[in-house]
């Protein structure tokens, strides 16, 4: 989904005010930055025995951070 958002924003430029499109782009960039910060915090987390991570943590930890354009 993140890869398709820039194209979606481009298609909406004729339908929505420019200020709204720019705000949405800024919010999308902030979400990417927050995602990177969460991933960094996860890398700082001390290793724990298998099975002791919170539910879903392994899926998130092993996921690459999205590129922010």
Image (spheres, grey):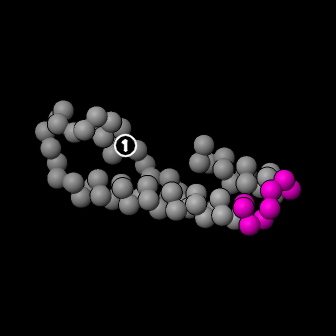
Residue in the image at 17% along x and 36% along y: 52
- Left or right for 8, reference 59: right
> Regarding mark 1 in the picture, which secondary structure is present there?
helix
- The residues colored magenta run 14-21
Residue in the image at 61% along x and 64% along y: 26
Q: Is residue 3 above or below residue 26?
A: above
Q: Is residue 30 above or below residue 64?
A: below
Q: Nearer the viewer, residue 13 or 47?
A: 13
- Left or right for 62, reference 54: right
Image quarter of the N terminus: top right
Q: Position of residue 24 (x, y in %)?
A: 65, 59
Q: Is residue 55 above or below residue 34?
A: above
Q: Position of residue 25 (x, y in %)?
A: 64, 61
Mark 1 — residue? 60
Quarter of the image for residue 20 reads bottom right
Image quarter of the C terminus: bottom right
Quarter of the image for residue 55 reads top left
């Amino acid at each position: 989904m993140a890869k398709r958002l820039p194209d979606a924003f481009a298609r909406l430029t004729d339908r929505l005010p420019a200020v709204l499109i720019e705000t949405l782009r800024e919010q999308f960039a902030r979400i990417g930055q927050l995602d990177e910060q969460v991933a960094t915090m996860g890398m700082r987390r001390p290793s724990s025995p298998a099975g002791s991570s919170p539910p879903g943590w392994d899926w998130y930890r092993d996921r690459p951070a999205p590129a922010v354009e």
